[in-house]
Amino acid sequence: MHILSGFTEIGLPIICAVIGLLVGVAVVFFVPFFKAKRDQNKAGKIVREAEIKAEHIVKNAQLDGKQVVNEMKIEADKEIKERKLELSAQEKQLFQREQNIDRRDAALIQKENTLDEKNETLNRRLKEVDKKEATLQEKIDSIISELEKVAQMSTQEAKDELFKRVESKVSREIASYIKNKEEEAKDQVVAKAQEMLVQAMSKYAQETTIEKTVSVVALPNDEMKGRIIGREGRNIRTLETLLGVDLIIDDTPEVITVSCFNPVRREIARMSLEMLIKDGRIQPGRIEEIVEKCKQEVEESIHKTGQDVAFKLGLPRINKELLDYVGRLKYRTSYGQNALEHSIEVAYLAGSMAAELGLDQNLAKRAGLLHDIGKAIDYETDGSHVEVGSRLAKKYGEGDVVINAIESHHGDVPAKYVISHLVQAADTLSAARPGARSEMLENYIQRIEKLEEICKSYDGVYQSYAMQSGRELRVMVIPDKIDDIGAFKLAREIKERIENEMTYPGQIKVSVIREYRAIETAK
């Protein structure tokens, strides 16, 4: 009993385990089998359904394809019919064009035939004309030959005589026309010009200048000359070397003359000598100190003068270096007239005239002030003061109006702006006013002789006089050789020659006088 119960306790679990093992093995082997079987049946079902659907789709596709083919066939037939109609219409048009071309071709052939006939007719007529022209030329030559015999003059001589008469007549007509037009213009502008000039001149008056190209330094006594010369001339050599001037010490009592083409150096020398004379210590070391000090003072004076002039005229934004050149004009003279005062005067006059005309007054003042800026350094560089001034204006960024006013104020280039003409007028007014300029006697005599020589070079002039210090020319002509129109033409030609060949201050008035005298003697 105990054994059985013991076996039961041990064997029962083992049996259960074996049975469970067998069941597990069966499940592992049989479950996939049944599952695969089931999946196979399901797949077969799906395939059959797909085959059925595919048959339906194929049938539907066949039906749709037949319908599309029928529709495309219908559309193709329709398009073919339309194309046939278009081709038919085009064939008709081409046929009509061919007919038109045939008609035109026939017309052209007919015109060509007509032109050929006309050409033949024209050629026949040209031949007839050539024959008639040859005959006419023979007759003309015969007539000309007869005329030459009668007139005792060749054909070329007759042409020359005719041309001379025509030229003389045309010349008189042109001169008369110019005279009439100028008189009309003068009637209209003289009153206005006089009013403008009077107003401009009345607003500014300038003192008479008498500066020369040398400076004179007064000495307290003649003993000072020896001290300035120094032992063996060392003091005067030092002065001339440092200053770049010539010191003229002659027999003139209590005077030393400073001569130099550079006005700035001449001014430095004058100041240095005056300071040395006042100081009394004249020796090379002291001379160097005084000269250096005077140079600085003159440079400061130049700079301040330029700024003062710009402020006085109310001209802003002028380059500082250009203002220094304006200040240097203080020591420059032309015909005895101070260049800076002349430039200021021109600026005032040009500005006043610009204001009267409604132009830019400040721009006119600027052009007037800078018109002679080249004179500040024309003695140090190549070129006339006009060329040097133009280069300076371009260098420091001045405008086209100012540059043209500088270049044209002596007529070197044409004046392109109204302000340029105003600067020319103002420059002439400033130079021509009484007391403005002085002139050397030799140059004055040469200018007077040249004026009279120009007048006497014309045929028909028997006498000429230079009046008012060369500011007016009176030309006497022979009335039998020069008529009234010719007198007007002669005055213009003399004026143009003077402008082109001579340099002169101010203006020169040319008056041609034609006087006819009838003289009889009673016996």
Image (tube, rainbow, N blue to C red):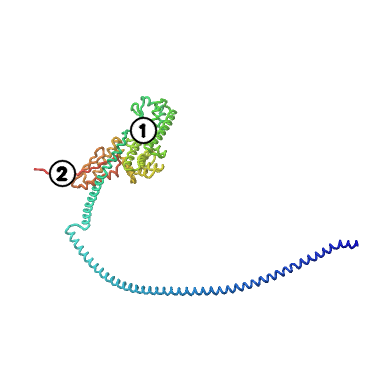
Q: Amino acid at mark 1?
A: Ser
Q: Which quadrant of the rendered structure holds the N terminus?
A: bottom right
Instruction: Work out how far the residue at label 1 is from the one at label 2, CA to CA, in angstroms.
Output: 58 Å
Q: Choose top left, top right, bottom left or bottom right for residue 135.
A: bottom left
First in sequence: mark 1 vs mark 2: 1
Q: Are marks 1 and 2 in contact (CB under 8 Å)?
A: no
Q: Position of residue 166 (x, y in %)?
A: 22, 54
Q: Is residue 515 left or right of residue 379?
A: left
Please identify, in this view, whether the residue under mark 1 or under mark 2 is nearer the observer.
2
User: Which type of secondary structure does the marked residue at label 2 adopt?
Assistant: loop
Identify the residue at horizontal 47%, vertical 74% (top origin): 80
Residue 259 - label: 1
- Left or right position of 177 against 11: left
SS at circle 1: strand
**Measured along the vertical axis of the image, is residue 322 above or below residue 236?**
below
Q: Position of residue 229 (x, y in %)?
A: 39, 28
Residue 29 appears in the figure:
yes
The residue that disc 2 covers is 517
Specify the farthest residue to the left.
523
- Nearer to me, 125 or 288: 125
Q: Quadrant of the C terminus?
A: top left
Give the farthest residue toward the front.
1
- Quadrant location of residue 509? top left
Q: Residue 215 lies in what quarter of the image? A: top left
**Nearer to me, 174 or 246:** 174
Identity, as a three-letter code, of the amino acid under mark 2: Arg
Q: Position of residue 37 (x, y in %)?
A: 72, 70
- Residue 349 horizontal/vertical position (percent): 32, 39
